[in-house]
Image (tube, helix red, strand yellow):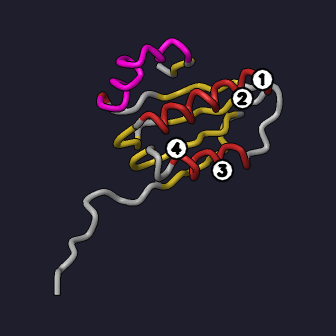
Amino acid sequence: MLATSPSPLPPFCVRVVRERGEIVVAPAGELDIASAAVLEREIRGLRVTRGDRVVLDLRGVDFLDSTGLRLLISLRNSAKRGGYGLIVAPGPARVQRVFELTGTRGLFDWRA
């Protein structure tokens, strides 16, 4: 019988907090093809209206693939169409590198 070792990374999760006029959405774990739908459901399920501000906090994201990036671009486009703000809090260097390599950093409004 083969012994299985536990996964070294915790499962993907999303925390949503409303604070000071903002809706903070903080995914944690790997934002990839296996988890992008979870984040999409959470954000699409928010009751965001014109004038609201959503902060997407990527500090807890360990990995970002092309599916995750495509989702973030889609969320940015939805925010533009919906008239609400989407601000991104940068993730770790390995996550930010994806934006640099793909030339998509300038598409987003970044929190300092």
Judged from the image, the secondary structure of the residue bearing numbered disc 2 is helix
Residue assigned mark 3? 41
The residue lying at 64 percent from left, 32 percent from top is 75
Per the image, the residue denoted by label 1 is 81
Rounded to the nearest angstrom, the CA distance separating label 1 from label 3 is: 18 Å
Which amino acid, mark 1? Arg
Q: CA distance from mark 1 to mark 2?
A: 5 Å
Please tell me how crowded label 1 is: few (under 14), some (14-19), or many (20+) other residues with Cα within 10 Å: few
Give the magenta range: 94-107
> Considering depth in this image, is 85 or 18 the residue closer to the camera?
85
Do tag 1 and tag 2 residues touch (Cβ < 8 Å)? yes
Across and down, in percent, residue 47 comes to 79, 44
Q: Are marks 3 and 2 in contact (CB under 8 Å)?
A: no
Q: Quadrant of residue 102?
A: top left
- Residue 62, magenta (yes or no): no
Q: Position of residue 91 (x, y in %)?
A: 40, 32
Q: Amino acid at mark 2?
A: Ser
* Disc 4 target residue: 26
- Tell me the distance, in whole angstroms, between the alpha carbons under discs 4 and 3: 13 Å
Q: Residue at x 57, y 52 (%)?
A: 38
Sequence-first disc among 1 and 3 = 3
